[in-house]
Image (cartoon, grey):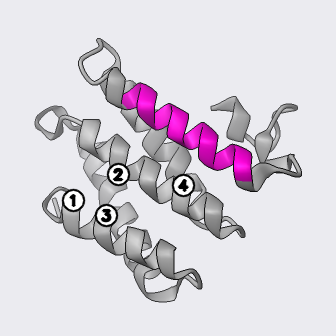
Amino acid sequence: MPLFAPSHESCILQHPDRHLLVPLALRTASIFAECGRHAPRAYDMALALLACAASLLRHDEAAIRQAALLAMKEAISVLPFDQASEELFAFLKDLASTLGDTCHHDPDPDCRRHAQHLLSVTGMSLSM
């Protein structure tokens, strides 16, 4: 997603109002993923959202980390795990580790709560 690529000229992570824009952009992408659940490329769309959101989990601003966690929840709900690749399961295993760190070490209580909820809701899928 070029909007989130630090090297891209229109990266919203550099915008002074990024704490407002990034969560809105992630929510919009989540809505597209949810609405496109049965679209031919829904799997690819959900994977892109998941990767984008995961890359923002260590951002300095809590609002952006919160939005990333909520977007990840949407992306994971769209992924058909019966069609998942080994690469996806490896990514999810690493993600579970990162979410565990977020649960214990994130300075924002809402981020910790969202990460814990994401792990509990998707526990079976992330442990594969």
Q: Which residues are magenta?
A: 20-33
Residue 122's tag is 1
Tell me, yes or no, whether the two marked residues, 4 and 2, touch with CB atoms within 8 Å.
no
Q: Which residue is mark 2?
A: 73
Instruction: Using the image, determine if residue 119 lies above or below residue 70.
Output: below
Spot occupied by residue 72 in the image (x, y as percentages of width and height):
41, 50
Q: Earlier in the sequence, mark 1 or mark 2?
A: 2
Instruction: Using the numbered discs, state the Cα–Cα distance from disc 3 to disc 2 in whole angstroms.
Output: 6 Å
Tell me, yes or no, whether the two marked residues, 3 and 2, touch with CB atoms within 8 Å.
yes
Spot occupied by residue 3 in the image (x, y as percentages of width and height):
71, 34
* Quadrant in the picture for the C terminus: bottom left
Please, what is the three-letter code of the amino acid marked with disc 4?
Ala
Please, what is the three-letter code of the amino acid marked with disc 2?
Lys
Tell me, yes or no, whether the two marked residues, 1 and 2, touch with CB atoms within 8 Å.
yes
Spot occupied by residue 46 in the image (x, y as percentages of width and height):
38, 34
Q: Which residue is mark 4?
A: 67
Kindly report the secondary structure that dominates the magenta region of the rendered protein.
Answer: helix
Q: Quadrant of residue 83?
A: top left
Q: Earlier in the sequence, mark 3 or mark 4?
A: 4
Q: Quadrant of residue 90?
A: bottom left
Spot occupied by residue 17 in the image (x, y as percentages of width and height):
83, 50
Instruction: Using the numbered discs, state the Cα–Cα distance from disc 1 to disc 4 in whole angstroms.
Output: 17 Å
Q: Which residue is mark 3?
A: 118
- Element type where label 3 sits in the image: helix
Seen at 44% across and 71% down, the residue is: 98
